[in-house]
Image (spheres, rainbow, N blue to C red):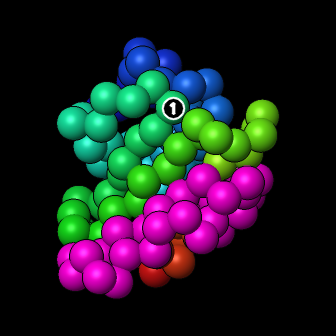
Amino acid sequence: MMNVWAIDKDTPLKVLLIELVHRYGENAIMLNSAEQHQQAIEIFTPEHPKLRAYIYTFGQQAGRYGIDLKYPIATHNIVGEHEEQRLEQIISILESHLFS
């Protein structure tokens, strides 16, 4: 079980994680513990560990997020196209990328 408040991450990222846990359950998302940047997380689902989302708050306005979508074939990755997104927009992108 992930204790969201115990991880050393930016508060908006914790808010996002709490919302995802609320919507999908505690075991629905995994956090890549190798990502050490305080303003970034990489998440995936246990069912599809090669589909990942790299979400960050660095370089964004307050309360906004950027997200890179990662696929098993790196040339399909979508990087730098989704910046300055609101929480609801990030959740929508994650729904189609990781949970559909």
Quadrant occupied by the N terminus? top left
Identify whether 20 is placed above or below 48.
Answer: above
Res 19 → quadrant: top right
Look at 41% across and 41% down and name the residue there: 41
* Residue 46 image offset from top left, x and y in percent: 23, 60
14 or 66, which is in the foreground?
A: 66
Identify whether 97 is placed above or below 33.
Answer: below
Look at 46% across and 80% down and name the residue there: 100
47 or 42, which is in the foreground?
A: 42
50 on left or right of 79 = left
Which segment did they paint magenta? Answer: 66-92
59 or 50, which is in the foreground?
A: 59
Q: Confirm whether the magenta stretch covers residue 88.
A: yes
Identify whether 96 is placed above or below 2.
Answer: below
Secondary element under disc 1, as helix, strand or loop, is: loop
Q: Confirm whether the magenta stretch covers residue 79.
A: yes
Res 35 → quadrant: top left
Res 33 → quadrant: top left
Identify whether 3 is placed above or below 20.
Answer: above
* Residue 55 image offset from top left, x and y in percent: 50, 50
* Residue 74 image offset from top left, x and y in percent: 25, 76
Can the viewer see residue 14?
yes
